Image: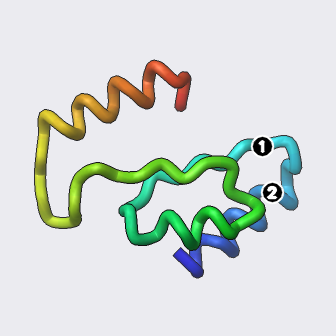
C-alpha cells in the first residue's frame, strides 16, 4: 500500500479533481485513511486466497450501484 501511494500522488498531481477510492483488505484501512489522496477506503470483505464467488458478485453489484467504472 505504501508503494501505491506514489501512484495515488501522481494521479492527483495530474488531475486534482479526481476522487480516488480504494478497495483493499481491512488491515490496510487505517493506512489508507491517513493518505490525503484517497477519498474513501472500501474494505474488501474476502481474505486473500479465498474465492468467495457469491460475496465477490454481491460486492460487484454494490460497487456498480455506486457508479464505479
Could you tell me residue 43's position as x and y percent?
41, 52
Determine whether label 1 and label 2 are within 8 Å by CB: yes
Q: Which residue is mark 1?
A: 18
24 to 52, vertically: above or below:
below
Could you tell me residue 11's position as x and y percent?
75, 57
Q: Is residue 50 left or right of residue 9?
A: left
Residue drawn at x 23%, y 39% is 56
Q: Secondary structure at mark 1?
A: loop
- So how many labels did they put on this image? 2
Q: Of 24 and 13, which appears nearest the observer? A: 24
Q: Earlier in the sequence, mark 1 or mark 2?
A: 2
Q: Which residue is mark 2?
A: 12
Residue drawn at x 54%, y 53% is 41
Q: Secondary structure at mark 2?
A: helix
Could you tell me residue 20's position as x and y percent?
66, 49
Could you tell me residue 42's position as x and y percent?
48, 48
Give the Cα separation between the discs numbered 1 and 2: 7 Å
Q: Is residue 47 left or right of residue 28?
A: left
Residue drawn at x 55%, y 23% is 67
Amino acid at each position: 500500500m505504501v508503494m501505491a501511494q506514489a501512484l495515488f500522488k501522481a494521479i492527483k498531481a495530474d488531475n486534482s479533481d479526481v476522487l480516488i477510492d480504494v478497495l483493499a483488505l481491512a488491515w490496510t484501512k487505517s493506512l489508507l485513511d491517513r493518505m490525503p489522496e484517497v477519498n474513501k477506503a472500501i474494505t474488501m470483505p474476502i481474505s486473500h486466497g479465498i474465492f468467495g464467488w457469491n460475496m465477490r458478485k454481491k460486492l460487484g453489484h454494490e460497487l456498480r450501484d455506486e457508479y464505479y467504472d
